[in-house]
Image (spheres, rainbow, N blue to C red):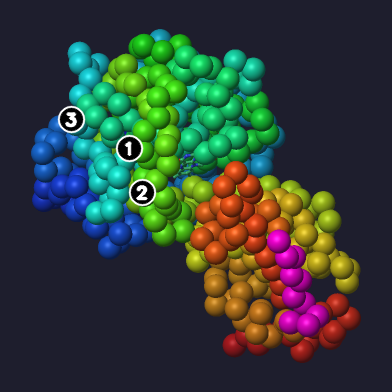
Amino acid sequence: MNLRTFLQDLDARGELFHIQEPVSPHLEVARRIAARDGQPMLFEQLAGFSEWRMAAGFTAQRAHFARALGCGASQLVSRMAEALAAPQIPPQNSDGPCQEVVWDSIDLTRLPIPRYHPQDGGPYITAGVAIIHDPDLGRNLCFHRMRVQDARRLVVRVVENRGTHTAWRKAPEGIPMAICVGLPPHILLAASMAPPEGQDESGIAQAFAPSPMVKAKTVPLEVFAEAELVLEGILTHALDREGPFPDLTGTMDRVRQQPVLRVTAVTHRKNPIFHALLPAGLEHKNLMGMPREPTIFAEVNRVARCTGVTITPGGCSWLHAVVQIDKQGPDDARLAIEAAFRGHRSLKHVVIVDTDVDIYNPQDVEWALATRMQARRDLVIFPDQASSSLDPSAHQSPGQKALSDKIGIDATIPWGASPEDFVRVTY
Ligand SMILES: Cc1cc2nc3c(=O)[nH]c(=O)nc-3n(C[C@H](O)[C@H](O)[C@H](O)COP(=O)(O)O)c2cc1C
């Protein structure tokens, strides 16, 4: 499956919203996506970029990933866990559609790279999966937002101490990097996962669905053969301004000095489709939060019988989780709270519920809080914990891990109580 076949499938189901009139990538595309967040969309014409179309919102629902992985939405967590445990090597093809068109000279202003918000530091690529090779750890895939600096250069946001940063720091001459844009949901999901150090995310993609690769033109890397667009280059040690740009939390991220990527090749499919991923929109949220659900699931399962985990969009798909357990003893919920925080270090608030509560329905979770919880008994506060740098309310000091208070809530039926008092009537 590639982006085109996935969009065709959405279309056949009547789920793809087509915008026929020309839309400008400068602010207008972002406004249209934000107005219908959650809706897969295809912009058929882009003002000033006659060759291109633009897709958005095709990973904005859990159902999109479930369809791409060939499972039900409730099986996504276990499918991710299985692929993590049993990755497969992607086949390497001799050629691929991503290289149907190879540019003679580089001019990034010919690409329909959107500007999302008036305060943005410039036009930004937000759905680019960067592929690098670490000499010690092998291939690594990672999302990086990228600001267009000029016709041949991008400034790349590289979060410290993750795969790309580690490899880049080791190489004073810079590292080769290839960026794939216009990928199907299963590759996007694999790229957003954080497997143990040294595990290549392309193996997770291949375990989800066939994900052939092909040799890049100017750098010693392989790229996804069916990507719509590929940029190749060197991530140098030159630095430039990156930001401001909207963060996952919907608040504005600050300006930093970040590495500059010198682009050495641009290749794309014929009649290419650009993927515009709205920062802090539902696609961004799903891709950030969902990959943490299996790690929470695994940790909770060590101490209790875990039957479901979701990281909620209301909590920026990063800071809040709901964990469902099949309670077997008086301490299960408290142990599950501690385990959930181990499973996702950035988690700030977690609610534990019973199996009769729908974890994907916020009203149902609130009902459990209303009818099963007493603060004195069921609320656990962990002060001054290492937490997420994304949380504007966390205590942040330069070079230090952010600190935050964390809360766990046991919203399960109290152990020893008579269940009839807590069971919902049905009609
Ligand atoms: C949509 C999206 C945008 C992201 N943007 C960035 C970014 O700009 N810089 C960055 O370092 N990580 C970014 N991330 C997070 C990385 O993908 C994540 O840290 C990565 O999966 C960690 O894996 P690694 O340690 O193997 O590199 C983003 C993730 C998503 C889903």
Q: With respect to residue 421, does 275 lie above or below? A: above
Badge 3 amino acid: Arg
Q: Which of the two discs, 1 and 3, sits closer to the camera?
A: 1
| Left or right side of 398 for 152 | left
- Quick one: quadrant of the C terminus? bottom right
**Quarter assignment of residue 3:** top left
Q: Which residue is mark 2?
A: 244
Residues at discs 2 and 3 in contact (Cβ within 8 Å): no
- Is the distance from the Cβ of mark 3 to the nearest ligand 1 atom less than 8 Å? no
Q: Which residue is mark 1?
A: 147
Badge 2 amino acid: Pro
Does dot 2 land on a helix, a strand or a loop? loop
- Graded by Cα atoms within 10 Å as few (under 14), some (14 to 19) or many (20 or more), the crowding at tag 1 reads many
At which x and y percent is residue 352? Answer: 71, 68
| Left or right side of 220 for 319 | right
Q: Which residues are magenta?
A: 375-384
Lower position in the chain sequence, tag 1 or tag 2: 1
Q: Which of the two discs, 2 and 3, sits closer to the camera?
A: 2
Q: Residue at x 15, y 32 (%)?
A: 51
Visible residue check, residue 330: yes
Does dot 1 land on a helix, a strand or a loop? strand
- Quick one: quadrant of the N terminus? top left
Based on the picture, tell me whether residue 251 belongs to the magenta stretch: no
At which x and y percent is residue 324? Answer: 70, 64
**Quarter assignment of residue 224:** top left
Q: Residue furthest front?
A: 398
At which x and y percent is residue 53? Answer: 21, 39
At which x and y percent is residue 218? Answer: 36, 11
Q: Which residue is mark 3?
A: 110
